Image (cartoon, rainbow, N blue to C red):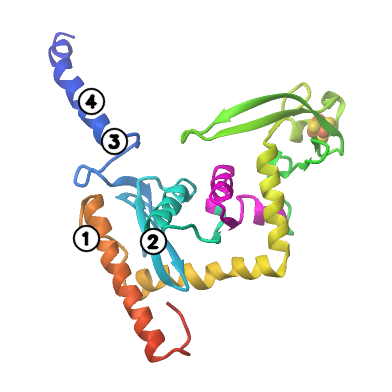
Amino acid sequence: MIRAAKEWPERLLRYQEQEKILSGRNSYSKTDHDATFMRMKEDGLNNREFKPGYNLEIATNNQIIVSYGVFPNPTDSKTLPDMIRGIQEEYGKSPDYLIADAGYGSEENFTFLRNAGIEAVVKYNMYERLRRRKPLKRPFTTETLHYNSKEGYVVCPMGQRMELCRTGTRISKGGYEREVGYYKAKNCDSCPLQGVCNGESGDRIVEVSREWREQRSAVDELLETDFGRKLYARRKIDVEPVFGNIKHNKGIRRFTLRGKKGVMTEIGLVATAHNLRKMIISILAPKAPSYA
Ligand code: SF4
């Protein structure tokens, strides 16, 4: 007790210093304060370990890297606005379309893209799962329920209309405000699906964002057209081969420099070499098959 009392000013200073280094993150590496512990993709032995690293994002156009960035957050969805702002600053304008996988498909990102005048060709999290032929593991989650945006009601698994009972606002960690509605079913206690659908006594209430459901419908409509499908398919032949080329063909799977500045320099050199090679190939052999 006496020892703790003696040590607390020193400990407090140490904790304050660590908080400063963390800057909102939940971990950092002692040997590289900018690196955050993340679950890595599997190694040669199929292990997925926590290691200090950076989330590398690249934007490409016809397999040319047009922008890149490294981020401390392992999830892709939070990196999109910063990447777009980087492109806007660098090129003085926004791209017409943004093609990205479901990891980027959040309400916050769709709203950001709409406000920036960019057409989102981005799948949302449940897009594939809702279209799979095999039954869903959790078939009654809110995301699976049909929302009628014209009349503003949700359809419950028994086909009942769940009416709006109140509204609210949700604020994300990044400060994005979502307007949500709460929709309530009736007579759930006498429903045969009560145990699997509601899981508790009383009438089920679900939280639905009208904005999110409308964004999802817009994606559904776009990806049902030939134009949308062709655009989305470009992801596989544009950005993915670039990652494949850098990581697999060139064997660049880890950074050798430390600190965000060093890592940005390193990826800048890699991107320059990649782009030069692409340009030289397109001049010398314009019809050669493109695998990045
Ligand atoms: S438990 Fe309620 S919400 Fe679920 S299916 Fe039955 S009536 Fe609908």
How many marks can you see?
Answer: 4
Q: Amino acid at mark 4?
A: Gln
Q: Residue at x 54, y 67 (%)?
A: 235
Mark 4 in CB contact with mark 2 (< 8 angstroms): no
Q: Amino acid at mark 2?
A: Ser
Relative to residue 46, is residue 133 drawn left or right?
right
Residue 15 painted magenta:
no
Q: What residue is at 38 percent from the left and 61 percent from the top?
A: 67
- Give the extent of the magenta segment: 103-132
User: Which residue is drawn at the image coordinates 76% and 27% (left, top)?
Assistant: 204
Residue bearing mark 4: 16
Disc 1/disc 2 C-alpha distance (Å): 21 Å
In the rendering, which numbered label is found on residue 71? none
Question: Of all residues shown, which one is farthest toward the top?
Answer: 2
State which tag comes first along the sequence, 4 or 3.
4
In the rendered image, which residue does mark 2 sit on?
Answer: 67
Query: What's the CA distance linking mark 4 and mark 3?
Result: 10 Å
Is residue 158 shown to the viewer in this render?
Answer: yes
Q: How many angstroms separate mark 2 from mark 3 (CA)?
A: 26 Å
Q: Determine which residue is flagged by label 1.
A: 256
- Decide: marks 3, 1 in contact (CB < 8 A)? no
Residue located farthest toward the front when viewing the structure as drawn: 92
The CA distance from mark 4 to mark 1 is: 29 Å
- Contact (CB < 8 A) between labels 2 and 3? no
Q: Quadrant of the N terminus?
A: top left
Please tell me which residue lies in front, 128 or 57: 57
Task: Name the secondary structure under disc 1.
Answer: loop
Where is mark 3, residue-wise? 22
